[in-house]
Image: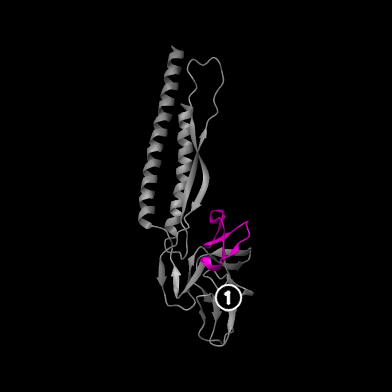
Amino acid sequence: MENALLVGLSRQVALRRELDVVANNMANVSTNGFKSRSSRFETYMMPKASADAFVRGDRKLDYVIDSGTTMNTAAGAMEMTRNPLDVAIKGDGFFVVQTPAGERYTRNGAFQIDATGRLVNSDGHAVVGDSGPITFDPSETDLAIAPDGTAASRQQQHGKARLVRFPSPQALVNEGGNTFSSSVAPQPAGATSRLEPGTVERSNVSPVLEMSRLIELNRSYASISTMVGRMDELKRTALSRLADVQAS
């Protein structure tokens, strides 16, 4: 009976983790360049008991353990904004931005100019070019980013936005603010990626699929909660009857 309760508890913990993942996906439906994630779980097989006094053979007990999440690397829908500083990546590349914690990587190409003239993302992190952060003078006009990543104004050019790629995007770690870090050095994106000016990549989250998954998870969680409650009630009833027998 205790084993049944523990198996149910392990499943509840896994479902709670998956609910968190789905909720995060839903919260980022409108986040430019966001990549949805899905949960991964593995079966943990309970080690067999080895006492020779058991009349029946040992029963295998399967527990659920969380083994992390996988990122959906599919491109989101491309939305034309006609903003000259908006740019979307077509391919497997990432922009490089400078944060207080070091260089980070993002697919969000909705850029703007901050008070100091730097080209920054929506969180105020400087966009890194081929020779460092890209900065414009306040007097410059007609700012734009070309398809090859060149950031320029009517007066002059300021280098190219740096694009990188990763052989294994699944190894990227979410750092918040729709940015990623990696323990593996990135490679130049090269011909694997190109830019689409005046366009932003939307989130690749499917609201319909996520909502249906959310309903399914809530039903599963409620079903297991009911089962665990019944097992607990059965345990208390058994202990109560056993106490009555011993008292008589």
- The residue depicted at 63 percent of the width and 60 percent of the height is 185
Q: Report the magenta residues as a range.
A: 164-192
Q: Nearer the viewer, residue 18 or 70?
A: 70
Q: Nearer the viewer, residue 204 or 148?
A: 148
- The residue depicted at 37 percent of the width and 38 percent of the height is 223
Q: Quadrant of the rendered structure where residue 48 is?
A: top right
Q: In the rendered structure, which amino acid carries the disc numbered 1? A: Lys
* Visual colour scheme: one colour
Across and down, in percent, residue 156 comes to: 58, 85
Q: Which residue is mark 1?
A: 160
Q: Residues within 10 Å of mark 1 (few under 14, many from 20)?
A: many
Across and down, in percent, residue 178 comes to: 52, 62
Confirm whether residue 109 shows in the render. Answer: no
Confirm whether the magenta stretch covers residue 174: yes
Across and down, in percent, residue 59 comes to: 48, 24
Confirm whether the magenta stretch covers residue 31: no
Q: Residue furthest top?
A: 248
Confirm whether residue 169 shows in the render. Answer: yes
Quadrant location of the C terminus in the rendered image:
top left
